[in-house]
Amino acid sequence: MYARLTTTELDNQVEENVEIPQEQNESIPSNVTANPRENIISTTITIEKNPESIDELSTIEKLDTTTIIDHSSTLLISSITNTCSTGRRLVLTTSSLDENQKSQFRLFITRFDISTSSTVDSSTTHVIVNENSSLVCPLTGKIIQGIARHLFIVSYRWLNECLSQETIIDERPYEIRGDTSLGSDHGGMRRSRLTSSYLLDKYSICLRCLSNDCAPLQTIEQVQELVELCGARLVRNFSEIKTLDKDRQMVLVLGINGFSGGEKKRKALLDTCQQFNVRCVNIHWLLISIAKFDIQPFENYDINQV
């Protein structure tokens, strides 16, 4: 049986309402270590104006599909020069912070002359989130986008401690471990950050769902970007299945309500999927696999059980 997903509004604030000083330190080095993710050409997208979270999801057993490589911290930063020893520039964005936390964020970026981004894009290095003392946060669209890009997902408490110590400290003790929807310790954020491999590089994915199926994201285009960031081949026309690379598992991703149209169309599509060995699942399989950075069992999201 598949996990059911519903959405609730986190707050009525626009996540990008944090007022950010425009002046930035141009002396900060910007050379970044080469990474396969940086070869992906992506379009800057607009993040949800009313961020929503995924909730009421049943527990799903995780599969060991990702090799973990324990890298050293990327934030060995001089309190004098505010530059990373790795030469990497910090670019922060926020998700679902309250007003007090936004105030601390503004103070942090001013004090340490840190760059920011209103969206999660190719320049972003950290997503700063609201959380409780257990390093658990609401699951928002920005967080899923950050996981797809292998970013640090970090508690706002890291900012407070940096300000308290008047230096940039190691962020790893403040890295988010889980979320309020999928579990408090599923480790998807860290698992993503510690691997340079693509989660979905063995899959071809065709999306046949509507924008209202995409929560906590807002648009199909945002979901398409996630698919490509995770290494899958995005199939825009289902008729392409006859010519696809057989080394990749083809997955047809439908909306939360399954097939649209009558029973005749439903049967024809199922027959085609069976003929070409296409797995047919609802969109929760894709979003939860990315959020946990762990391929979920197809059976839990099989469209025949919707």
Image (cartoon, rainbow, N blue to C red):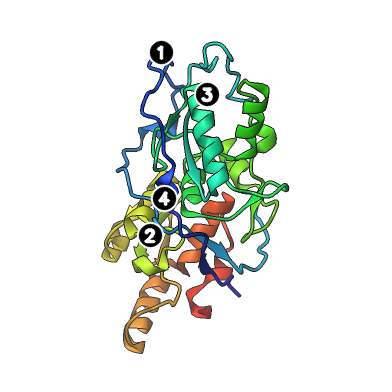
Of the pair 88 and 188, the residue shown nearer to us: 88
| Labels 1 and 4 touching (C-beta < 8 A) | no
The residue carrying mark 1 is 27
Whether residue 273 is visible: yes
The residue carrying mark 3 is 111
Which comes before the other along the chain, label 3 or label 4?
3
The residue carrying mark 2 is 218
Of the pair 226 and 49, the residue shown nearer to us: 49
- Numbered disc 1: secondary structure: loop
Going by the numbered disc 3, the residue's amino acid type is Arg
- Numbered disc 2: secondary structure: loop
Locate the N terminus and report the quarter of the image it occupies: bottom right
Going by the numbered disc 4, the residue's amino acid type is Leu
Mark 2 surroundings: few (<14), some (14-19) or many (≥20) residues within 10 A: many
Task: Tell me how far mark 1 sits from mark 3, CA to CA.
Answer: 15 Å
Going by the numbered disc 1, the residue's amino acid type is Ser
Which comes before the other along the chain, label 1 or label 2?
1
Provide residue 183's location: percent of width, then percent of height. Answer: 67, 58
Rendered view: 218 above or below 17: below
Q: Residue at coordinates 29% horizontally, 43% vertically from top-left? A: 43
Of the pair 121 and 262, the residue shown nearer to us: 121
Q: Nearer the viewer, mark 1 or mark 3?
A: 3
- Numbered disc 4: secondary structure: helix
Going by the numbered disc 2, the residue's amino acid type is Gln
Q: Residue at coordinates 35% horizontally, 37% vertically from top-left? A: 40
Q: Nearer the viewer, mark 3 or mark 2?
A: 3
Task: Tell me how far mark 3 sits from mark 4, CA to CA.
Answer: 33 Å
Q: Nearer the viewer, mark 3 or mark 4?
A: 3
Report the disc number at residue 226.
4
| Labels 2 and 4 touching (C-beta < 8 A) | no
